[in-house]
């Protein structure tokens, strides 16, 4: 029976990264090796950067945010952007809570609906996003490890091809409507 192809795992992405500097593959991400830890850190940092832009796959449009017992709306730790809409208040994020600039208060009496951008673990991303994050992270990791701009295993062209694939995926899956004037 043929092997079934599955989406890229975090360990596969890290191993692709450490191969760019000539290292043998890691068997676990819990390794005490400094290069493996730097690869993991780089992969996760690039993933945060990419996801922070907000894509169809990590954006919720009518997400409910409710006050806690102290009447504060505390933002879950995996949410990086909050945009409250259709509201009489002037709500912004301050730290890990929402703040009403009109009332000069962190206290809220009602649940608010917001557009939010969430962060997901690498393996919760669609494959096209995993590919882009992995290629970009490998290039950045190799630059930081060796500092040789011309020694890339993953070139700027590979990164651009992955970027275009991610953009195409977004265009296909996002609910975008263009209005003509």
Image: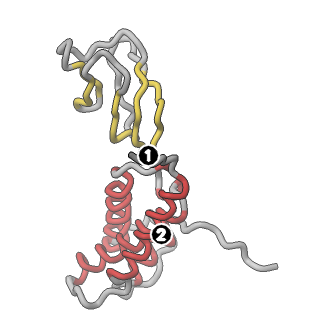
At horizontal 36% and vertical 58% (from top left) the residue drawn is 50
When the figure is inspected, residue 81 is found, relative to residue 110, above or below; the finding is: below
x, y (%) of residue 5?
A: 67, 73
Residue drawn at x 21%, y 14% as measured from the top left? 105
User: Whole-percent x and y of residue 141?
Assistant: 30, 74
Residue that mark 2 sits on: 165
Q: Is residue 81 above or below residue 121?
A: above
The picture quadrant where one finds residue 78 is top left
Who is closer to the viewer here, 167 or 6?
167
Q: Nearer the viewer, residue 103 or 71?
A: 103
In the displayed structure, 115 sits above or below 109; it is below
Residue drawn at (44%, 84%), measured in percent from left and top? Answer: 24
Secondary structure of the residue carrying tag 2 is: helix
**Residue at the extreme front:** 181
- Residue at the disc numbered 1: 179
Q: Residue furthest bottom?
A: 151
Q: Could you tell whether 77 is left or right of 172 in the image?
A: left
Residue 102 in the image: x percent, y percent? Answer: 19, 15
> Is residue 62 found left or right of 53 in the rendered image?
right
């Amino acid at each position: 029976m043929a092997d079934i192809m599955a989406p890229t795992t975090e360990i596969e992405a890290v191993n692709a990264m450490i191969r760019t500097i000539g290292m043998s593959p890691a068997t676990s991400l819990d390794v005490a090796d400094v290069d493996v830890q730097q690869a993991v850190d780089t992969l996760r940092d690039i993933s945060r950067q990419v996801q922070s832009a907000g894509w169809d796959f990590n954006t919720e449009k009518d997400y409910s945010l409710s006050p806690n017992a102290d009447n504060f709306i505390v933002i879950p730790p995996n949410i990086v952007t909050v945009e409250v809409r259709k509201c009489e208040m002037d709500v912004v994020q301050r730290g890990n809570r929402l703040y009403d600039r009109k009332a000069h208060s962190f206290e809220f009496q009602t649940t608010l609906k917001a557009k939010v951008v969430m962060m997901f673990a690498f393996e919760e991303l669609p494959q096209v996003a995993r590919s882009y994050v992995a290629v970009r992270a490998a290039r950045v990791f190799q630059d930081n490890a060796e500092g040789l701009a011309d020694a890339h295993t993953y070139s700027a062209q590979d990164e651009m091809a992955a970027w275009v694939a991610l953009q195409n995926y977004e265009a296909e899956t996002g609910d975008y409507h263009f209005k003509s004037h």
